[in-house]
Image: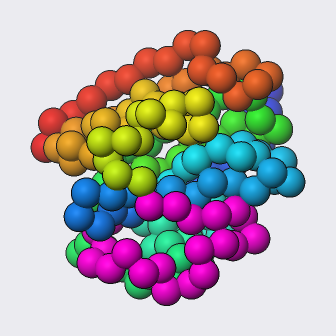
Amino acid sequence: MSNEKDYAKNIELSSVIFIYCKNKYLFLKRASHKRIDPNKLNGVGGRLEEGENFLQGAIRETEEETGYVITPENIFFSGIIELNGGYEHNHIIGLFKAEVFDFDIPKKDTTDDGELIWIDKEEIMNFENEIVDDVKYYFKDIMEGNIINFVNAKLDDNQKVYEITMDKLTV
């Protein structure tokens, strides 16, 4: 029973949202000084605040990091991923996708977390070495938008996936 308590204490809850406009997706290239995933591309997101659910966290993080104001009506739930190992804490992340209608990011292209970059959806996998490792496994499903992923990934000390299980629901 103590292992369950230790496990629960070691979990960080986050939301990540993949924002798109026409045929491009907005990625955050994390700053080189960041402890987690420096110089890697990921969606917009971050830790949940106390009392927040995954959806509320995605909406807040989107506005804080980009200035885009999105509502639950603009968001598609894409799944839940659990990351074990590789980081100081294990992570459970709510994954979302949202459409915006303007490439002009309301806030600057550069934030404290890094640089916001629009990437054509046909080119995203060409950035394979720069994308956060777990994203490579489910991003195509997120782009297609008709699959909800439930993912458990085990990471090594370099944040590389060495074992992954994925269950999918078609909606």
Total numbered badges shown on the rendered structure: 0
Residue sticking out furthest to the top: 163
Q: Is residue 87 left or right of residue 33?
A: left
- Residue 144 in sight: yes
Residue 107 highlighted magenta (yes or no): yes
Residue 35: x and y in percent read: 83, 48
Picture layout, residue 12 above or below residue 69:
above
- At a point 21% along the width and 43% down the height, the residue shown is 144
Residue 25: x and y in percent read: 38, 57
- At a point 43% along the width and 28% down the height, the residue shown is 137
Image quadrant in which you'd find residue 26: bottom left
The quadrant the C terminus occupies is top left
Picture layout, residue 17 above or below residue 39:
below
- At a point 15% along the width and 36% down the height, the residue shown is 170
Q: Main secondary structure of the magenta part?
A: loop
Image quadrant in which you'd find residue 49: bottom right
Image quadrant in which you'd find residue 114: bottom right
Picture layout, residue 146 above or below residue 58:
above
- At a point 26% along the width and 72% down the height, the residue shown is 74
Residue extent of the magenta highlight? 96-118
Q: Is residue 115 left or right of residue 89?
A: left
Q: Nearer the viewer, residue 44 or 26?
A: 26
Q: How is the image coloured?
A: rainbow
Q: Nearer the viewer, residue 113 or 88?
A: 113
The quadrant the N terminus occupies is top right
Residue 113: x and y in percent read: 72, 64
Residue 12 highlighted magenta (yes or no): no
Q: Nearer the viewer, residue 6 or 75?
A: 75
Residue 105: x and y in percent read: 47, 79
- Residue 50 in sight: no
